[in-house]
């Protein structure tokens, strides 16, 4: 299994531009999580899906952030417009059944820099 | 709601020395507990997990952790640290069957002196 695949690994963009981060979960996993990691705030859960349905998006910082999961093998996290304070590492993770029992498998992350 | 505290932000040990990283959790029922490791520039990798049964669990890379209900702790240990163990370590707690989320601690950064 190739694991959780995220793209791109690095993204540098100018303030105001739209940014799209992509994630392919492990085949057979039915829960998917988006996290943001910064030095100041640590790991923050942004949103998670179960069977492609968003369950909790209370961690999404504001309306500029949106996430979709059109099918079981693909999810996107979009920031529009991007701001310098969005600079962080964004992780996608997936789990079999409920992650609270089984734990997650993380992708390698996307390092986003907004200048 | 559950919570996790990792009291040590940064620990430095000499190569070959023993290691213990502390983790305290708050949860009303029997928790599901996890330790993850994050090497620089990488995602988080699962080291070990505790669900039930034997309170001493073995993980990958020679790590072990002990669940102590009376102390609400799940400390990570390794008898002899290698330079490659330098990384950040995260403790996490899940609410168990039927729950989706893991709650992560802030992490402990481990530095290893040759």
Image (cartoon, coloured by chain):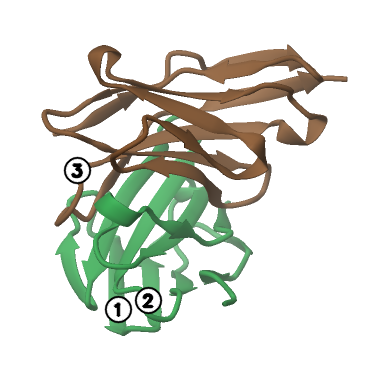
Callout 1 touching callout 2 (CB < 8 Å): yes
Query: Compared to B55, does A27 lie above or below?
Result: below
Measuring 50% from the left and 14% from the top, which residue is drawn there? B8
- Residue A75: which numbered mark, if any? 2
Q: Is residue B72 above or below residue A61?
A: above
Q: Secondary structure at mark 3?
A: loop
Secondary element type, mark 2: strand
Q: What percent of the width, then of the height, locates residue A66?
A: 28, 67
Residue B94 visible in the picture: yes
Residue A60 visible at all? no
Q: Position of residue A68 (x, y in %)?
A: 29, 76
As drawn, the chain in green is A
Distance, label 1 to label 2, CA atoms, is 4 Å
Please tell me which residue lies in front, B16 or A87.
Answer: B16
Quadrant where the N terminus of chain B sits is top left
Instruction: Please give the residue where the numbered disc 3 appears in the rendered image.
Output: B95
């Amino acid at each position: 299994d190739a694991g959780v695949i995220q793209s791109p690994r690095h993204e540098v963009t100018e303030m105001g531009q739209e940014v799209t981060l992509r994630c392919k979960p492990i085949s057979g996993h039915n829960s998917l999580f988006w996290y943001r990691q910064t030095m100041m705030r640590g790991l923050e859960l942004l949103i998670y899906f179960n069977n492609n349905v968003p369950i909790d998006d209370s961690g999404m910082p504001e309306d500029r952030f949106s996430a979709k999961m059109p099918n079981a093998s693909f999810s996107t996290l979009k920031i529009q417009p991007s701001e310098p304070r969005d600079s962080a590492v964004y992780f996608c993770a997936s789990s079999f059944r409920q992650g609270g029992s089984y734990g997650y498998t993380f992708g390698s992350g996307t390092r986003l820099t907004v200048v | 709601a559950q919570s996790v505290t990792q009291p040590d932000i940064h620990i430095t040990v000499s190569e070959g020395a023993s290691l213990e990283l502390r983790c305290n959790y708050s949860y009303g029922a029997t928790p599901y507990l996890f330790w993850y490791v994050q090497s620089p520039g990488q995602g988080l990798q699962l080291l070990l997990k505790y669900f039930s049964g034997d309170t001493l669990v073995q993980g990958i890379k020679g790590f072990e952790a002990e669940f102590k209900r009376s102390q609400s702790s799940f400390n990570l240990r390794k008898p002899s640290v290698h330079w490659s163990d330098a990384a950040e370590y995260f403790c996490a707690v899940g609410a168990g069957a039927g729950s989706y989320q893991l709650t992560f601690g802030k992490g402990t950064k481990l530095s290893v002196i040759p």
